[in-house]
Image (spheres, grey):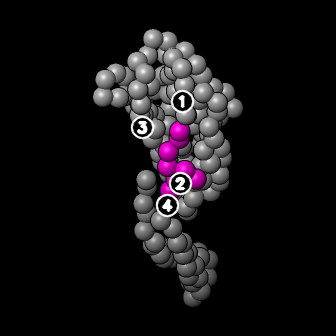
Amino acid sequence: MKVEKAISILALVSVIGIPALAATIVGQVTIFTITCGLNTNISSINFGNLFAGQNSSVQVVNVFVGGNFSNASTFIRGTNWTSIVSSFPVQQTLWINVTERPLTEFNQLIRTIFGPTGFDLGFKLMAPLGQLPTNYTQNITLTVEC
C-alpha cells in the first residue's frame, strides 16, 4: 500500500517584459492517502460430504474491494488440505473467475480493478481418489494491493 500525505505547493513566476509588473501564481494540490480493503460475504466454505474421486458443487463467495484508490490488484492463494491423519494438495481446489484454475500456495492475480467494486469467485473441490475418509481443512487467502 502506498501512503502519501497532503502537501501544498507554492509556485512563483515572474513575467518578463515591463520591469514594474510581476505576477504570482499559487499552485495547490492535495494528495489523498491511498487506502484499500477487501471483504467477503462469508468467512468459510463448506463443500459438504464427498466420496473420494467426487467433485463438489460450485460454492460462490462475494468479494468487495473498497477504499480510496485508482487501481488495485487482487490475489488468491491457499494451503494444502489437512486432517490429523492425512492431507492432499492445494491444487485439488479450483477457483473460478471467468475460467477454472487450480489454487496454489503462491499468489495468483485474480484481477486488477480501477476503483471500489464487487465481484464473485467460485470454488470447487475435487476430492482425490484413495483419500482417507475424515474431515479436512484448507485456508484460502484473498489479498488486495493498492
Q: Nearer the viewer, mark 1 or mark 4?
A: 1
Q: Indicate the position of residue 138 as horizontal and vertical percent values.
A: 42, 34
Say which of 120 and 82 sits in front: 82
Mark nearest the camera among 4 and 3 is 3
Instruction: Name the residue carrying label 2.
Output: 39
Mark sitting earlier along the chain (2/4): 4
Q: Quadrant of residue 68?
A: bottom right
Magenta region, main secondary structure: loop
Structural distance between the alpha carbons of marks 1 and 4: 43 Å
- Between disc 3 and disc 2, whose residue precedes? 2
Give the residue type at disc 3: Asn
Residue 77 lies in magenta, yes or no? no
Q: Earlier in the sequence, mark 1 or mark 4?
A: 4
Look at mark 3 in the image and give the residue it sits on: 139
Mark 2 and mark 4 in contact? Answer it, CB < 8 Å: no
Residue flagged by tag 1: what amino acid is it? Asn
In what element is the residue under mark 2? strand
Amino acid under disc 4: Ile
Are there few (<14), some (14-19), or many (20+) residues within 10 Å of tag 1? few
Q: What whole-number distance in Å separates the C-alpha atoms at marks 2 and 1?
A: 27 Å
Res. 114 visible in picture:
no
Q: Residue furthest bottom?
A: 20
Kindly state the secondary structure of the residue where label 3 is placed. Answer: loop
Residue identified by numbered label 4: 34
Q: CA distance from mark 4 to mark 3?
A: 28 Å
Q: Is 89 placed above or below 141 here?
A: above
Is mark 1 in CB contact (under 8 Å) with mark 4? no
Give, as a single range, the part of the protein colored magenta. Answer: 37-47
Query: How many residues crowd mark 2 within 10 Å: few (<14), some (14–19), many (20+)?
Result: some
Provide the residue designation for mark 1: 49
